[in-house]
Image: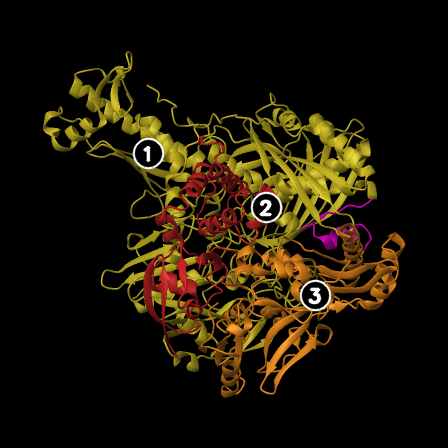
Chain colours: A yellow, B orange, C red
Amino acid sequence: MTAGNEHIGQAHRRGNALRHLAGRGRFVTDLALPRMLHAAFVRSPMARGRIAELDVSDAAAAPGVVRVFTAETLNKTCAPWTGTLEHFAGMKSAPQNILAEGAVLWAGHPVTMILAHSRAEAEDACELVLLDIEEEEAVVDGDAALLDGAAPASEGIDSNLCFRTVLETPGLDDAFASAAHVVEESFTFGRHTAVTLEPRAVIADFDPSTGQLTVHQGTQTPYQFQDVYARHFGLPESKVRVIAPDVGGSFGMKLHVYNEEMATVAASLTLGRPVRFVADRLESFVSDIHARDHRVTARMAVDAAGTILAMDVDDMTQIGAFSTYPRTSVAEGNQVIRLMGAPYRMPDYRGRLSVVFQNKVQTSQYRAVGHPIACAVTEALVDRAAEQLDLDPFEIRARNLVADDAYPHVSATGYQFEKLSHQTSLAKLRQLMDYDTLRSEQAELRRQGIYRGIGIAPFVEITNPGAAFYGVGGARISAQDGAVVRLTPGGDVQCAISVTEQGQGTETIIAQIVADQLGVTPDQVKVTTGDTDTTPSGGATWACRGAGIGGETALRAGRRLQAQILAIAGAVLQADPATLALAGGAVIDSGTGRERITLAEIGRIATYRPDTLPEGCDNSLSAVQHFAPTGYPFDFTNGIQASHVEVDIETGVTRLLKHWVVEDCGRIINPLLVDEQIRGGVVQGLGPAFFEECLYDDMGQMTNASLADYLVPMAGEMPDIEIAHVETPTLDTILGAKGVGEAGTAAAGAAAMNAVNDALRPLGARISQTPMTPLRILTALGHV
Amino acid sequence: MKSPKFDYVRAGSVADAMTAYAEADGDAVFVSGGHSVVPSLALRLQAPALMIDLSAIEALSGIDLRDGWLRIGAMTRHAQAMTDPLIATHAPLFAAAAPFVAHPAIRNRGTLGGSLAHADPASEFPAAALAMRAELEIASAQGIRRVPADDFFVDIYETAIEPGEVLQAIHVPCAVAGQMVAFDEIARRRGDYAMVGAAVQAVSAGEGLQDVSIAMFSVGNRPVRAASAQVALTGRALDAPAIAAAQAALADDLDPPDDPQFPASMRLHLARVLLGRVLAKLETAA
Amino acid sequence: MNIEIALTVNGETVRETVEPRTSLADLLRDRLRLTGTHLGCEMGSCGACLVMLDGAPVHACLVLAVQADGQKVETIEGLNESGHVSDLQAQFHDRNALQCGFCTNGMVMSAQALLSDNPRPSRAEIRDALSGNYCRCTGYEAIVDAIAATADRRAGIGETVE
């Protein structure tokens, strides 16, 4: 029998939100363990140099200091790590270890670790470390880094080219030769960073008496870190437990391997006591991964009717001195060149990617990996083509978006789309934003010297990856997730699952899904996440797989348990299980709906009176299920966004008036959570479009590495965001959910850039660099 | 981001504070609201042996009228500047500037005296004080002196306050009939330090604008009096040509720093735009 | 040097001996284990550490524990138990105006202060009042909605909670 859908699709509120509202969150930063030591690091003040002298004797003797580690004393405890994957053919990166040995390779590279009774004392001792570095010329610019004779950004590499690849369809040159119009533009996408409000935090607790390492870590991916710590420190996997309690934001940033976390584990293993490292905000800016930092040159060929024929794209991205581990720093560029033009029928394409080393903080996967760049480039060119052809932005997109009945469809870059809803979404957006009224208002205001702009951007979002992302390249990153669903002796339900919660509502949707399989309410389902000892193994939460893969896992586990409960009920009631169903916390007669026996009674009998059940009846009251997608290598969602802005053409300041999103994430499990994911994602797209940028000087120093100087999007500047949905479930799963976490971020910046350029168009100005700062807008306008 | 160690004393009087400073051989820092000092300590930009807390000194509090001046105690919080009726009447540029200063919680704690003594050239209150032709009351071992705002702001984070001296109060000339003020700034985000800011005060008289006082901020190493722009407006009706003349004159008044992220030409451009807008608001206010 | 201080925290008198450099936030979190006050930047930019000091929100990272001697501090734990913000909390919950929860303490403090100063704020005034509270997760709109709805209900408008 099939389960009901009483709770899936409903706007259930998050139970765990109540803890936070009461001040009862439990973050790693809140945890204090007996005998715990606090870590601080001495970091390289220079982007590139050689350690000439390092004397830690004064620091070691400072009040409160328990131990000082340098590369010499700490790195030997850890097998080096290398951020390459086999499916990125030819990529290279030097091996890394915990503390800088000989060379320092970015400003912020940790050199010395100090452990003291308090963080303040550890910081005091940092000031006593004598560190003398012979400064060397840093590699700061990606183009310069590729010139002949450029010094390598790290040791043991022969050039600064980490990876290069080209995708090309056979018809590309013909497409451009036959085009009625070719539009072309160069883009710069600034480097920015996650700025989770809770910084990275880890407490490693090694108990030498049992050989057990417990790591409390603010991360999305506890199992990945269990594997990393076991392998790199030579521990049996069963002796490594990683616990991720409440996590104060992650967004992809907290699933990479960092020097400081490895140092914290190494120090605890060495000292046999708990060691805590919590990055302060200054450290976050020079050690959390950065993202983007792409320069793209792109052109688009269109015919006289406005049909997009081809795109030709060259992306150069700058990733720091190493490729990150274990997911690499190549994945973003790889997605940039493969997502170009994805919503369109465009038959031909060439994409070239160069991934380049430099002496800055590493870049790697952060929310909506590659999407904002591919989307902004594509949509800017579509708008330029529309301008050339004197077509409305909606019209040119209507002519080119893949038709809703044309699926399955394969993009020019080889992406396979199961079923998307671009045309429906486009029409829905037009209505949602009252486009025609906005256009007439815009024209009226222009006569008054007010420059408003409207920009739209369709997008696709990659979700639910199987092994195609990382596993095929040799990374030990789980493609599957696992769930154990149990009925307690008292008739409650518990679900332990490998997908994790960072506030997006994972536990709530899992409870909704399981509740529907077992005929209970979500409140009756206790969901456990984030602990490698108490949940089954799995990939956890990244690339929008929590709902699609985690949800499907929970659904299937719930159905297994449902079958077991019905079998027990059938035995107890002397009834055919096929005539029974679960609802209202009980087994019911599926024909009449009449209650036959409560779940509590099933729990009681199976637990306390199994002797009354027939021989061989499964009375475990638990079901385990692991699930990995087996159909498409990954899913795609789609949608479209619109931005309405007003540019003050005298000051270059842009006011965000309104933002709209039409989104198709497949089956919606919880609209309240889905909308909040979209809104938060939009703001993480608008932030780097207007404010966020890691600024570096030509010596490789980040010059705005504090929260006073790095501008995050705040309430005062962000617009209201109106959302509508189209629902096209994937048929790859029973649940049909595709995921939604990155959709908002994918296209917000693209819509905003088109809106700003729409506002500037009457003045003959254009901007193609993010963030779109007042300086850049005034420069485009010729005022500076 | 933990501060280095220091000792702490809560001074009961200005004299006690100055004595404590002397006894520490000057290796001390005064703190009022602490919203400039505490972050700079957390960043380990300074490491004084002693922190002398001025916040309990009664003589630094209070707002009252004395001899045609409004005396504002240095310990007056930013939030008070937004609500105090005497400040609204006689020091209206403080009231106008306050909502632009950081965020509500900062304003609950930050003090006017602290802000002026810190003398951040991008900060609002120093420019407001300059535009209102305020005088700063400074206590030293030798006694009390009053320094006009034009002489008070010396350089970035540097004022006429000598080491060991205490800023006690701000004196603002009482408002006169026909006085108009306007304040505005251009910032990236609400509450950020301004890219450019302007505080303007003038008296509307029959024969045109008089006593024009313009202070621009975030345009140099201290709040800058736009003397040429003042001249350009004085005696004229506040019309478009007069505003244009004042905007043009700013080139003589300002010599903004040049930075790749913020070229001097951009600051000058924004200063002109902002001055035009602020003067237009002045007109409306009249 | 260590200094003995006495302050009222959530209605309880607390006596502690602290180094002058100890921030109020570190005192609350590390000594009193009131971990609902969060640290996001330690320089007054993010608003995660807001507490009520003598009734008005301040950054606990910018106030030294010694400066709070003799004063009344109320943290999110105290505000929660007092019941004074139960309507705000309910609106935040209903509208999912928080995700990771790290900013929530500061948002509630700012909202409560705003509504006591200005019981009927406009949306723009709400956004302005939150201008020093960073949230990376939500997109702010739900927070604005929750505060606006609380204002309405405190004014007797729109009693039903959807």
Location of residue B241 in the rendering, given as x and y in whole percent from the top left corner:
89, 54
Left or right? Give the position of A208 relative to A388. left
The answer to whether the residue labelled 1 contacts the one labelled 2, judged by CB atoms less than 8 Å apart, is: no
Location of residue B212 in the rendering, given as x and y in whole percent from the top left corner:
80, 64
Above or below, A155 against C57 in this view is below
What is the magenta range? Answer: A764-783
Q: Secondary structure at mark 2?
A: helix
Which of the 4 quarters of the picture holds residue C27? bottom left
Pointer 1 local density, CA inside 10 Å: few below 14, some 14–19, many at least 20: some
Q: Is residue A445 visible?
A: yes
Q: Residue furthest front?
A: B67
Q: Is residue A79 visible?
A: no
Chain bearing tag 3 is B
Left or right? Give the position of A73 relative to A674. left
How far apart, in angstroms, are the residues tagged by discs 1 and 2?
A: 36 Å
Number of numbered discs visible in the structure rendering = 3
Q: Point out which mark residue B174 bears.
A: 3
Residue under pointer 2: C125
How far apart, in angstroms, are the residues tagged by discs 3 and 1?
A: 65 Å
Left or right? Give the position of A224 relative to A636. left
